[in-house]
Amino acid sequence: MTAVPEDRGATLLELTAVMAVFSLLSVMSLQLLAGALDNRTRIVGAGDRAEELAAVSAVFRRDIEHSAPVADVGGQDARFRVEDGGRTLRFSILSDDGGEARQSPSLRIVTWQFDVVTGTLSRSTDAALDEGRAQTAAMLDRLEGWSVRVRTAEDGWLPPGNWRAPEPWELPLAVEITFGARPLGEIRVLAAR
């Protein structure tokens, strides 16, 4: 009769090999999980940023749609203009934010300004006929750039830079702003009258 070999278990070398493979698989799984969590965080951040840009774009479009051809309001030049090499956009709007008590729209001067140093886009409104009601709000931060182009009936699209309505009653046909917004890249918003 043949003797049945005794089962003595795994050797130390076999156990070490199994533990090494298990450790390698664990490290790879943790790296994969960490990468997935980082991607999720980036996607959520990009979604939040896209919502911010959409909200600012809606305010900008509304401002352009309500722009009014006015020359001088309360001693301020209210003509539609782009200044500071395209970093400042200033014009007058008819605003109906007075509530039920106000029967007619109010005239406001709106200024959109990009600060190159801080990367912040702000919007300020001055109640043209009511001193002391100026409001400024930072609309967007962490911008890499901002430029403004206008389209006129005579010249078509003008390159980014300075422009002033030649006559008080003239308004551009359309205004295009371009945001340089990380992580989304370059975003263009077109507002037409």
Image (cartoon, grey):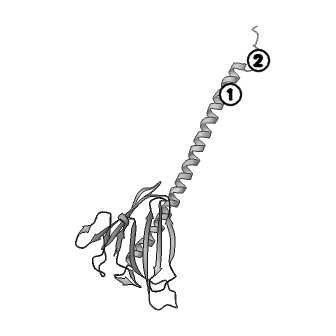
Nearer to the camera, 2 or 102:
102
Rendered view: 162 above or below 28:
below
Q: Position of residue 151 (x, y in %)?
A: 29, 69
- Relative vertical location of residue 145 with respect to residue 5 in this rendering, above or below: below
**Residue at the spot 68% in from the left edge and 21% down from the top edge:** 14
Residue 52's x, y, as percent? 50, 64
Q: For mark 2, what is the residue?
A: 8
Badge 2 crowding class, 10 Å Cα cut-off, few under 14, some 14 to 19, many 20 or more, is: few
Q: Which mark is residue 1?
A: none
Residue type indicated by callout 2: Arg
Q: Position of residue 69 (x, y in %)?
A: 34, 81
Q: Find residue 61 and report its image quarter.
A: bottom left
- Are the two marked residues, 1 and 2, in contact with CB atoms closer than 8 angstroms? no
Residue placed under numbered mark 1 in the picture: 19
> Left of 106 or right of it: where is 158?
left
* Observer-nearest of 35 and 25: 35
Residue extending furthest toward the left: 154
Circle 1 crowding by C-alpha within 10 Å: few under 14, some 14–19, many from 20: few
User: Does label 1 or label 2 sit earlier along the sequence?
Assistant: 2
Q: From this viewpoint, which residue is outermost toward the top?
A: 1
Give the quarter of the image for residue 175.
bottom left
* In the depicted structure, whether residue 18 falls above or below residue 128: above
